Image (cartoon, rainbow, N blue to C red):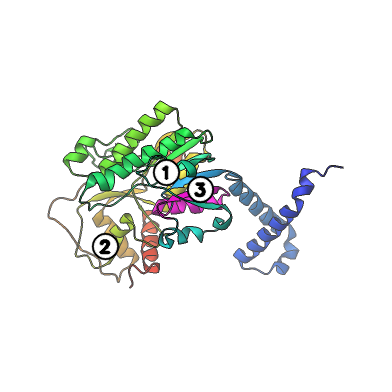
Amino acid sequence: MEVTPYVKVCPCFLSYFCITVASVFQKLNINPFLLFPYGFQLWYVLSKTLAEEAERMSGGAAKTVCVTGASGYIASWIVKFLLRRGYTVKASVRDPSDPIKTAHLLALDGAAERLHLFKANLLEEGSFDSAVQGCEGVFHTASPFFHSVSDPQAELIDPALKGTLNVLKSVAKSSTVKRVVLTSSIAAVAYNEKPRTPDVVVDETWFSSPEVCKELKLWYVLSKTLAEEAAWNFVREKGIDMVTINPAMVIGPLLQPTLNTSAEAILNLISGAQTFPNSTFGWVNVKDVANAHIQAYEIPSASGRYCLVERVIHYSGTVKILRDLYPSLKLPDKCADDKPFIPTYQVSMEKAKSLGIEFIPLEESLKETVESLKEKKFVSF
């Protein structure tokens, strides 16, 4: 007689059930024998935990996706969350043999079973073919982010623009990819001739102007603007389903061992700087950004662009939050110039919240960033 599917999976389910029960006791730090008089409550807690775990794992069960630039700050968190949800991840990096780029990825839960590293170069057409092959989703995060450059075209614009098109060309060759999630930036949204003042609300209908970027020599902003524009043109022509995530300055805990540009902005403030920049930025937690990528992939109705900004604040306000969090820390108490402070503005959260994102407060994000910088030995106090 044929064995029913339920009986076939029963041993695995029992094993999984026992592990989950044990983890609940461990998390609650309780002696299980003390709970026997409260059997009903115990089984309620356990059943709820099992249901939540099953729901979490079902999202990526048996699905394979690609993450480009996987060793980067945002991408590392995307990989972590994808593995947690049960996905198999094909991760592209420039040098899979470099432990500085890969050790933190290989140490993630689930990596031994479901993480596969691929070598790829943004500037080589066809370089991403093998990584994309057989995937249902592609998360394209790979793009350089730094401010000081000697050759903007070679260092920023070509890798962002040509790299994005090379990844999309690999997607166009695939018959399995259902959606691409592109890591863009608020940089591709907010820099144009429109004023940004406290009563102005920036939203996904805004696009940065390449002419303004060139005039102001905002080379990183230009690279993200050109890359996103080219991506939309390409996917419309090829009929590819794409969603873009447009975060502001991303902070929060670092998984990678190297210092990224946005975390460096906070490090500079807490490392004895005498002044703070006369600048206003939006900020968002890296965990929210990673979650938004996955939600944008998994929610069928997700479409278009999603700005991610928890708060827009002047650097003076960022310093004040840090001073409240770390009263004994030496922080800058004056602005780098005597000009009026650059005004703040608003960024719409409406579309982001449709992805189910409940933003982590800036105060918590800053604290996580500082503690992570301390843990990684970038600063000590």
Nearer the camera: disc 2 or disc 3: 3
Q: Describe the element under mark 1 as helix, strand or loop.
A: loop
Counting residues from the start of the chain, the first of labels 2 and 3 encountered is 3
Could you tell me which residue is drawn at 28 percent across and 52 percent down? Answer: 146
**Tag 3: Cα neighbours inside 10 Å, few (<14), some, or many (≥20)?**
many
Q: Describe the element under mark 3 as helix, strand or loop.
A: strand
Whether 62 is drawn above or below 369: the answer is: above
Q: Amino acid at mark 2?
A: Asn
- Judging by the rendered image, the residue that carries numbered circle 1 is 127
Q: Are marks 2 and 3 in contact (CB under 8 Å)?
A: no
- Judging by the rendered image, the residue that carries numbered circle 3 is 90
Could you tell me which residue is drawn at 47 percent across and 33 percent down? Answer: 173
Could you tell me which residue is drawn at 64 percent across and 54 percent down? Answer: 49
Whether residue 347 appears in this view of the structure is no
Counting residues from the start of the chain, the first of labels 2 and 1 encountered is 1
Tell which of 126 and 85 is nearer to you. 126
x then y, percent, for residue 130: 49, 43
Q: Is residue 89 magenta?
A: yes
Residue 74 shows which numbered tag? none
Instruction: Describe residue 5's horizontal placement relative to residue 208 as left or right.
Output: right
Among all residues in the image, which is located at the extreme right? 1
Q: Amino acid at mark 3?
A: Lys
Instruction: Describe residue 166's horizontal placement relative to residue 218 as left or right.
Output: right
Q: Amino acid at mark 1?
A: Ser
Instruction: Describe residue 332's horizontal placement relative to residue 142 as left or right.
Output: left
Nearer the camera: disc 2 or disc 1: 1
Nearer the camera: disc 1 or disc 3: 1
Q: Describe the element under mark 2 as helix, strand or loop.
A: helix
x then y, percent, for residue 245: 40, 41
Counting residues from the start of the chain, the first of labels 1 and 3 encountered is 3
- Judging by the rendered image, the residue that carries numbered circle 2 is 268
